Image (spheres, rainbow, N blue to C red):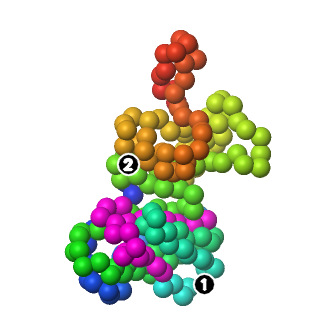
Amino acid sequence: ARKAPTTTAYYGYNQNNRVFGSLKINYAHYVNGAKVRISRYYQKYYDKLFTSYYGGAKIRSTFSTTTGTLTITGRATGVEYAKILNSVYFRTTSRRNYVRTIVWNLGANVLYSSATGHYYEWISTVGRKSLSWGQARSDCSRRYHLSMKGYLATVTSSTENYFIQYVSKSQWGWLAGTDYKVANTWRWMA
């Protein structure tokens, strides 16, 4: 897994503070969105992320006060998404001067976990036939995110388990464990 870009800083009270400002993304392919998330010391209802982008890409952005996540949707190249992300601002009305950690990633349905160093994407089967474990495994292996090949998630810690639960919104899904060779003996299978 590649490490997602993060930034940490103190941010002034009730001021618009540019989060990044000088990101460069040398990825010429098209991307369908991005997420920017306050991953450490998020002050619910006090902190906010927003964009001030006036470029040529048609984007929309929404901020979730529940998760501290700014979701940006719209199709643009990675190079253009650098401009979009450089227009993200942070504002807080909290008097607590915590050092916030802010993480970003490209892809509308992808989230990065700083705890595991991996990207996660929840693939819903709503509106289509449910998949068997083997079909889900094949479906994941045909997906790519920023040139990285997908695979079913392998839970290696309780922290990762909680993150996957958050990403999936507690829905049922397939993981990369199987008892195919020996019944009731679960193993990871790539």
Q: CA distance from mark 2 to mark 1?
A: 32 Å
Task: Look at 45% across and 63% down and name the residue there.
Answer: 67
Quadrant in the picture for residue 4? bottom left
Circle 2: residue type: Gly
Seen from the viewer's position, the closer of residues 123 and 87 is 123
Residue 129 x %, y %: 77, 40
Mark 2 lies on a secondary structure that is loop
**Main secondary structure along the magenta-highlighted residues:** strand
| Magenta span contains residue 38 | yes
Mark 1 lies on a secondary structure that is loop
Labelled disc at residue 47: none
| Mark 2 vs 1, N-terminal side | 1
142 displayed left or right of 53:
right
Is 17 located above or below residue 142 in the figure?
below
Quadrant in the picture for residue 109? bottom right
Tag 1 residue? 56
Asked whether residue 174 appears in the rendered view, the answer is yes
Estimate how packed mark 1 is, as few (under 14), some (14 to 19) or many (20 or more) residues with alpha carbons within 10 Å. few
Tag 2 residue? 117
Asked whether residue 77 appears in the rendered view, the answer is no
Residue 156 x %, y %: 39, 34
**Chain part drawn in magenta:** 32-51
Dot in front, 2 or 1: 2
Seen from the viewer's position, the closer of residues 55 and 73 is 73
Circle 1: residue type: Gly
